[in-house]
Amino acid sequence: MTIIRRYPMLRDRRPLVDDLFESFLDSFNSLSNVSWSPVVDLDETNNEYVLHAELPGMDKKDINISVENEVITISGEKKERVKSKEANCHISEIAFGKFSRSFRLPSPIDAEKIGAKWENGILTVNIPKNEVAKARKIEIR
């Protein structure tokens, strides 16, 4: 979309509705170039990593978790909300579509013991560290 800037002296000839419509189209165009990706927190304790991912509006059956070479990947697809045919949509900011997030973990993990739980749109993945990677105190003799 090309935006034509008008000179200030001609401003009074342009209706306010045109300004609002142009502003709406600008915001729509900027949103359409953004791909959806869930936000995450990754915490570390002595024994494990804990990954929290916000996935509101999703069903746990639409989420996949995989591990390969110390890289954990969360992927899936958030379905588009079913809209009423009688309603006119004025604003549509809820993102949907496929996503994939991968994280390389800084130390070896025990992939066989990874566990995940789903509660209120939050995915929590517990990723135990391998015994070699756990921090430990060395006693001096």
Image (cartoon, rainbow, N blue to C red):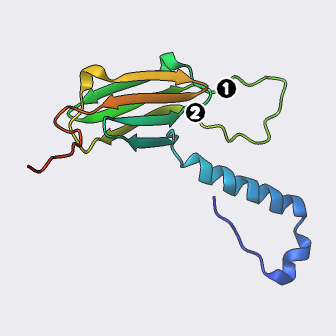
Above or below: residue 139 compared with residue 56: below
Question: Outermost residue toward the top?
Answer: 61
Q: Residue at x 51, y 19 (%)?
A: 60
Q: Which residue does the image show at 74% across and 25% down from the upper left? A: 83
Residue 132 percent location from the top left of the image: 16, 36
Classify residue 84 as left or right of residue 113.
right
Using the image as rendered, state which of residue 29 and residue 77 is in the foreground: 77
Residue drawn at x 38%, y 29% is 126
Image quadrant assignment for residue 19: bottom right
Dot 1 lies on which element?
A: loop
The foreground one among 114 and 63 is: 114
Circle 2 Cα neighbour tier, 10 Å, few/some/many (<14 / 14–19 / ≥20): some
Q: Is residue 126 above or below residue 105?
A: above
Camera-side residue: 127 or 84?
Answer: 127
Marked residue nearer the N-terminal end (2 or 1): 1
Q: The residue under label 1 is which amino acid type?
A: Arg
Label disc, if present, on residue 20 of the rendered structure: none
Circles 2 and 1, Cβ within 8 Å, touching? The answer is yes
Q: Position of residue 74 (x, y in %)?
A: 40, 31
Residue 81's mark?
1
